[in-house]
Amino acid sequence: MEDSSSDTFYHRKILPVLIVAFLTLNLPGHVFAFDLESRVKEFTLPNGLRTIVLEREGSPTFAAHIAFKVGSVEETSGYTGAAHMLEHMLFKGTTTIGTLDWDKEKPLLEKIYRIGDQLDTARRENRDETIVKDLATRLKNAQAEHKKYVVSEGYSKLYSAEGGVGFNAGTSKDMTTYIIRLPSNKLELWAWIESDRMKNPVFREYYAERSVVGEERRLRYENDAEGKLYERYLAASFMAHPYGQPIIGWESDLSGLPYRVVKKFYDTWYVPNNAVIAIVGAVDFEKVKSVVTRYFGDLKKRSCRPG
């Protein structure tokens, strides 16, 4: 990405996040008189990962945001919902978080992806119902066997045990953000968890989670008058632009969204040179720089272009 694009992303997307985080951490009213932008410090790693820091005294906590410059506008026609589905997948853990035995889990996941893809193909091609039922049964059995090795809510449990709050994420048209607030002495823990999430994500429970997202879509759009109206309004307003696509995806795409498409979306866009870290709170800039460099510095810079 060009520098001008990165600067625009920072000023339009990241700086407002910093300011909101700063103003919501129990600060007195006179902070509104401060020039917050002049207090922001930043550094960029050789791999392109940019980090901006706002030091503040008071509560011994910090808020951390990791924003990726990618959203639903980067999706390919016919595969809408990939950005939002990927957000869900990145809560499922890594090769060390969310698993009881990765060596035994890995072959089961590969089996699930293979059967799931065959099932999607059979449904898409309207194959004989007996074939569809057989594949559905095989997928269900494989999922049951795989579940023995899954630790649900691995991230949430780990963060909560260490005093973390507000663990969440959000997907928009242009950006996907992952957030958490932690005690100041947990900076290195945060760096280990989030760098591991960028390096070794495991998209476990993919087909089950795709069904969950489908239910979310039905609840918020198909069975909600305001949601349905808003979705149709955007589709009519942006007939030749991806802004007309719903972030959650069209039902016809989402119901058969392939695992390989979501994985490719991750490989394409979740690269260090397409991300910005924002940290606000009782932290030391030099300490943040040291920790981020140690844990995120070995991520490989890649061209964040589809294809």
Image (cartoon, rainbow, N blue to C red):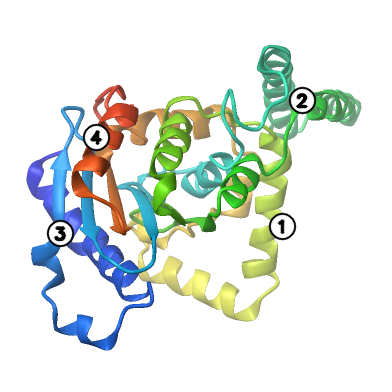
How packed mark 1 is, by other alpha carbons closer than 10 Å (few <14, some 14-19, many 20 or more), is: few
Q: Is residue 270 left or right of residue 127?
A: left
Residue 189 in percent (x, y) is at 46, 39
Residue position marked by numbered label 3 in the rendering? 40
Q: CA distance from mark 2 to mark 4?
A: 35 Å
Q: Is residue 170 above or below residue 201?
A: below
Mark positioned earlier in the residue sequence (2 or 4): 2
Residue position marked by numbered label 2 in the rendering? 149
Q: CA distance from mark 3 to mark 1?
A: 41 Å
Q: CA distance from mark 1 to mark 4?
A: 43 Å
Closer to the eye: label 3 or 1: 3
Residue 137 seen from this side: yes
Residue type (three-letter) at the residue carrying disc 3: Val
Residue 229 in percent (x, y) is at 55, 77
Residue type (three-letter) at the residue carrying disc 4: Ser
Residue 306 seen from this side: no
Q: Is residue 85 left or right of residue 173?
A: right
Residue that appears at 51% across and 34% down: 262
Residue position marked by numbered label 1 in the rendering? 215
Mark positioned earlier in the residue sequence (2 or 1): 2
Q: CA distance from mark 2 to mark 3?
A: 44 Å
Q: Which mark is residue 290?
A: 4
